[in-house]
Image (cartoon, rainbow, N blue to C red):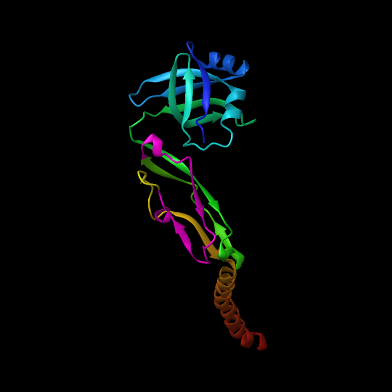
Amino acid sequence: MSKVVLKAKNRQKYGSAESRRIRRSGRIPAVIYGRSGKSLSIDLDSSEFSKSTKGISESTILKIEVEDKSFDAFVKGTQRNIIDGKILHIDFYEVESGVVLRAKVVLVLSGNPIGVREGGMLETPSHEIEVECLPKDLPERIEIDISNLRANQSFYVRDIKLAQGVKLLSNPDQVIALVKFAKAEASTAAATETAEAAPAAAATAAAADKKAPADKK
């Protein structure tokens, strides 16, 4: 996949009033944060950003051109309007060629697990992992085939086959996907309810037995 290129303008004025003015003009205020702690305030065309970045993951490295300079960076975070979902602000993190970085990579699951076809229920508690690598080795996403996952089996972070040069930082024992056998759970629940109801029924019967002689007098 070719690198996405975004055109941006250097932002000279700051503050909430200026940010609102930028948004009204159809652009998005943003900041590029560098490894040295320095930052550059910019703004981008809203429509161009949405169109160019559609379908990319958070670990996709973008090329941002600001006047006569260019930066390789990925989206570190976005602030959105809670009502209409429009992007209000973007934080970019600059990456340098040859310098190791840490990033979160999206997990994409594929396949219909055997356990699900046998009546189980699929749960996916984790949707991303954190890795460390050079920018050139950073995967945009990691695809995992869970077709062979059976009932009462789990797929862990440690089961992921990472490319050479990519180091795992997430907990290897973290569960990515698991299949619970629904029928077994239903049977267990029914047995538990029966066991819990038995003492109550016994107590009711005992109370009735104690009360019976008094009623006869």
Toward the viewer: 206 or 145?
A: 145
Q: Which residues are magenta?
A: 133-162
Quarter-of-image position of residue 38: top left
Point out the image quarter for the C terminus. Answer: bottom right
Give the x, y percent position of residue 62.
Answer: 48, 29
On whether residue 157 falls in the magenta region, the answer is: yes
Q: Farthest residue toward the front?
A: 2
Residue at 49% over, 11% down = 13
Q: Is residue 42 above or below residue 2?
A: above
Q: Would residue 37 appear left or right of 88 to someone viewing this image?
A: left
Q: Is residue 61 above or below residue 160?
A: above
Q: How many marks?
A: 0
Residue at 33% over, 24% down = 36
Q: Is residue 29 above or below residue 173?
A: above
Q: Farthest residue toward the right?
A: 216
Q: Is residue 68 above or below residue 87?
A: above
Quarter-of-image position of residue 32: top left
Toward the viewer: 8 or 205?
A: 8
Give the x, y percent position of residue 215.
Answer: 66, 85
Q: Would residue 138 appear left or right of 125 to someone viewing this image?
A: left
Give the x, y percent position of residue 194.
Answer: 58, 75
Toward the viewer: 87 or 200?
A: 87
Q: Farthest residue toward the top?
A: 12
Give the x, y percent position of residue 136.
Answer: 40, 36
On whether residue 153 falls in the magenta region, the answer is: yes
